[in-house]
Image (cartoon, grey):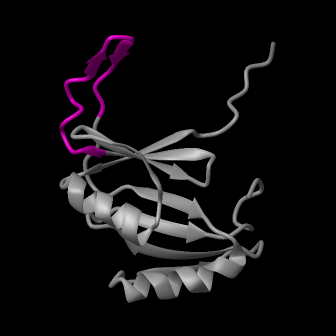
């Protein structure tokens, strides 16, 4: 049997203030929360993937549950994620972000027709809203 990975299910960002980050991702990016507890937040991204926020350093000890164990993990410094949006939505997103005090740091027009705008979350992670036409598979 040929082994195949279908897609990325979870993406994790590590944040210094979970409540501040939660407000940004729920209110500004309008991502629906799936889980919200003292350890982490999980958001539904397009009904196809999950964005997880963990408090920096808090998951270094791993997590024991009645059904298993999740090993230690963490990250330091600003990370980057790209979030897919429809091409006709990009100008609306740009206006929405600016209306919420989010600075657009960069723009890119890709050779295959895609466009990107770049901005930061409260923990300085570089976020990208990207339209189809930047990769062979998107």
Above or below, comparing residue 67 to residue 99 in the picture:
above
Q: Nearer the viewer, residue 13 or 43?
A: 43
| Left or right: 16 in relation to 11 | left
Q: Quadrant of residue 105?
A: bottom left
Write down the region rendered in magenta. Answer: 54-73
Q: Quadrant of residue 86?
A: bottom right
Q: Residue at x 70, y 76 (%)?
A: 87
Q: Is residue 62 magenta?
A: yes
Q: Residue at x 73, y 26 (%)?
A: 4
Q: Residue 46: horizontal and vertical position, in percent?
A: 61, 55
Q: Nearer the viewer, residue 119 or 43?
A: 43
| Outermost residue toward the right in this view | 1
Q: Is residue 55 magenta?
A: yes
Q: Nearer the viewer, residue 36 or 121?
A: 36
- Res. 104 in view: no
Q: Residue at x 28, y 37 (%)?
A: 74
Q: Nearer the viewer, residue 120 or 106?
A: 120
| Left or right: 100 in relation to 9 | left
**Quarter containing the N terminus:** top right
**Quarter containing the C terminus:** bottom right
Q: Residue at x 21, y 40 (%)?
A: 38
Above or below, comparing residue 57 to residue 121 in the picture:
above
Q: Residue 57: horizontal and vertical position, in percent?
A: 18, 39
- Res. 33 in view: yes
Q: Quadrant of residue 3?
A: top right
Q: Residue 135: horizontal and vertical position, in percent?
A: 71, 59
């Amino acid at each position: 049997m040929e082994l195949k990975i279908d897609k990325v299910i979870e993406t994790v960002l590590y944040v210094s203030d979970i409540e501040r980050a939660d407000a940004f991702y729920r209110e500004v990016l309008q991502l629906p929360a799936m889980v919200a507890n003292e350890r982490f937040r999980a958001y539904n991204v397009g009904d196809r993937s999950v964005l997880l926020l963990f408090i920096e350093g808090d998951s270094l000890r791993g997590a024991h549950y009645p059904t298993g164990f999740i090993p230690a993990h963490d990250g330091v410094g600003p990370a980057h994620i790209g979030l897919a949006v429809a091409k006709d939505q990009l100008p609306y997103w740009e206006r929405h972000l600016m209306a919420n005090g989010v600075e657009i740091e960069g723009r890119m027009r890709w050779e295959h027709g895609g466009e990107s705008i770049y901005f930061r979350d409260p923990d300085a992670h570089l976020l990208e809203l990207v339209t189809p036409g930047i990769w062979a598979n998107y």
